[in-house]
Amino acid sequence: MVACKPDVKETKGQYKYFDLKGFIQADSSRLNRVNPSVTKTVNHNGQSETKNLKIANWGHELGLFASSDINKPSWQQSYAVLARGDSITYKALTPELKTRELTVTKIKGKVTRIHIVNHTKNMLYETSEALTYLPDSVYTIDKSQHVILLGNNRYIIKGKFKK
């Protein structure tokens, strides 16, 4: 991996890092217009349910992705920026940051994959999330949570776009 400067073109100079929130908002608007069918599987602690459906609000559906945005003014020096091939990875420099890692893969300037690792821990609970989004293909949310007095929960949500 090679450390590099952020790609100012992709964020139009407004942000130091990839504009994840802006990308998800724009893609959610596009998906709301296109209204694709999705095969969605929700697994909670080993119990699965799969449905074919249309998502009414893509902004809500992809909300965990948008909330993993790393472009807060106070975080301008909080992430290492590493480039490898077609991917750029932002790694948290301190353990307090919820978004530990964000990897964006582009082919010919078009985002083809986003992968996010989030982690939060305090006295009451610990949560780990692995989020993956391949536009117009699939999105997954794998969330493990341990809450004091309530125990462990694991949620895996997978939405596969129908062609």
Image (spheres, rainbow, N blue to C red):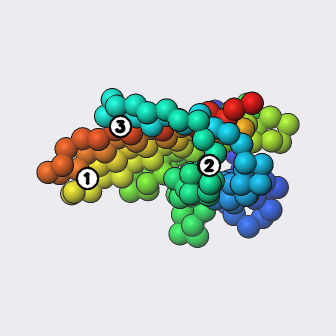
**Mark closest to the chain's N terminus, 1 or 3:** 3
- Left/right of residue 26 with respect to residue 109 in the rendered view: left
Residue 123: % across, % down: 21, 57
Could you say which quadrant of the image residue 76 lies in? bottom right
**The residue under label 3 is which amino acid type?**
His
The residue carrying pointer 2 sits among few (fewer than 14), some (14 to 19) or many (20 or more) residues within 10 Å by Cα, namely some
- Nearest-to-viewer mark from 1 and 2: 2
Secondary element type, mark 3: strand
Residue 40: % across, % down: 54, 36
Q: Return the residue at label 2.
A: 55
The residue carrying pointer 1 sits among few (fewer than 14), some (14 to 19) or many (20 or more) residues within 10 Å by Cα, namely some
Is any part of residue 46 visible from this angle? yes
Quadrant into which the N terminus falls:
top right
Depth order, front residue of 29/127:
29
Q: Is residue 47 above or below residue 91?
A: above
Q: Residue at x 68, y 39 (%)?
A: 37
Q: CA distance from mark 1 to mark 3?
A: 18 Å
Q: Return the residue at label 3.
A: 44
Q: Is residue 135 above or below residue 80?
A: above
Q: Return the residue at label 1.
A: 125
